[in-house]
Amino acid sequence: MHDVVVVGGGIAGLTAARDLAQSGHSVLVLEARDRLGGRTWYKQFGDTGRRTEMGGTWFDEPTQLNIAREIQRYSLPTVLSPAGQEFRVSLCGRSLPRPDQPVPREFRPDLDKALDHIIEQSRRVTFGADLDNPDLHDLDISFAEFIGPYTDQPFVAEYLTMWSAFAFGCHPSENSALQVLIWVAGYDNAVWTLDDAPATKFAKGTASLVDALADDSGADIELSAPVASITDAGNHIEVSTVGGDTHTARFAVLAAPVNTWQDIDLPIGADSLKAQFAREGLAGHALKLHALVDNVPEFLMASGWGGPLCWTSEQANFDGGRLLVGIGEDDSAIDATDPAQVQQALRQFAPEATVRICHGHNWSADPYAKGTWTTYRPGQLSRYYSDFAVPHGRLYFAGSDLARGWAGFMDGAIESGTDTAAALGQRLRDDA
């Protein structure tokens, strides 16, 4: 019998497994997929000999201290994404010249009023603490409602819609303004930082972090082992897989995305806060794609509204083409693996673009993700934040979806895995 079974081999689960194993506890990790990494995936890009990040990619070491610690611990090389040189903005059906970006100059005062409102309200938030404070409940509304008074001007309305959709992977009517303000507060109330701060990535891909965590943990790891049920037997816990295996342990950690919890028979009670949270689910359903493209300007960085993509940027160049990454708010808008559809989407920003090869992963259709990065619906932080870290009997919880700080980032996954391992480690010592 293991001390702990960790369900989910993403970054949170692997962090928890490592910390628990290095504290002297026996750990088994069960991962549903045939790979580790969860919502990160450093995948081969066709036959180009290159790999791209299908999921989580970027971070900001100065403000995201948990991932910075792991980078230092494992001496992982990092690189900055290429800086844009050719900037293009498409709003209200118009391609805006550089002097009129991000909105036409005559409407810039309107945009400034909206941004000042965001900054002013973000100062009410203490990053990483007391996010269910009743004094903040008035901010836990949709971002669309939050910015509504500042969107009479169509260019400003479309810019703010694009800005939020790019950052949170859904329409502003679906995500909580409080989470937007948490991120702004995390960047020292600098609203523009959301556009360009998380620009650092792993030189050898997110796989370098995933492999380092797995190798350092010494935990037993089983792949292709989706879990069907977790049963709290009082003095131990039983974790049964879809394949019919049952693993017994003193405790378990559920480190799978919240949107997948309903697919596991959990000992948490149908009326519990966690069960209610799982039924509602998180809002993110972003589209992310990569394309090797000809006939686009060098170091293009473009954003806009009105098409399948709200942002695209060059990440590399090879074989005479340019590798673009694109993000949109609706993963059903186009097929990210269809060159014709991707080419049409990119032509909103670069009319001569010709796509050679492209790929993407529909995370919403992935049964072990059922969505993209953490995006809270209006009201969820007020209702559920205080319950995020609360165990149910012998079952503990971890994941970027449950982070106190940078929920939705790899940093949040590391933070949650670290905190859960610390709390469970103390319980294991007390229970010895």
Image: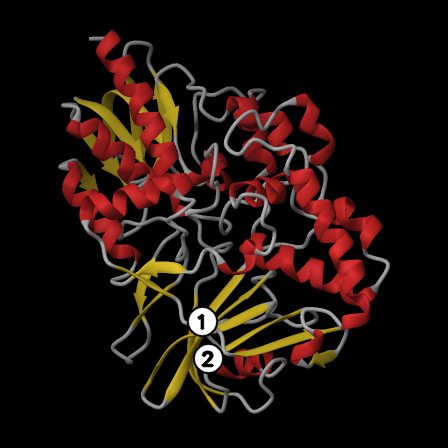
Residue ID for mark 2: 299
- In the displayed structure, 46 sits above or below 384; it is below
Q: Is residue 400 above or below residue 167?
A: above
- Colour pattern of the rendering: secondary structure
**Between marks 2 and 1, how big is the CA–CA gap?**
7 Å
Q: Which disc, if any, is residue 83? A: 1
Q: Is residue 137 left or right of residue 76?
A: right
Q: Earlier in the sequence, mark 2 or mark 1?
A: 1
Placement of the C terminus among the 4 image quadrants: top left
Q: Quadrant of the N terminus?
A: top left
Q: Is residue 76 left or right of residue 339?
A: left
Along the line of sight, the residue nearer the viewer: 177 or 331: 177
Between residue 356 and residue 297, name the one nearer to us: 297
Q: Which residue does the image show at 53% across and 78% down from the upper left? A: 342
Q: Hey, what amino acid is under mark 1?
A: Ala
Q: Position of residue 231 (x, y in %)?
A: 36, 21
The answer to whether 263 is drawn above or below residue 293 in the figure is above
Residue at image x 19%, y 47%?
A: 74
Q: Secondary structure at mark 2?
A: loop
Q: Quadrant of residue 55?
A: bottom left
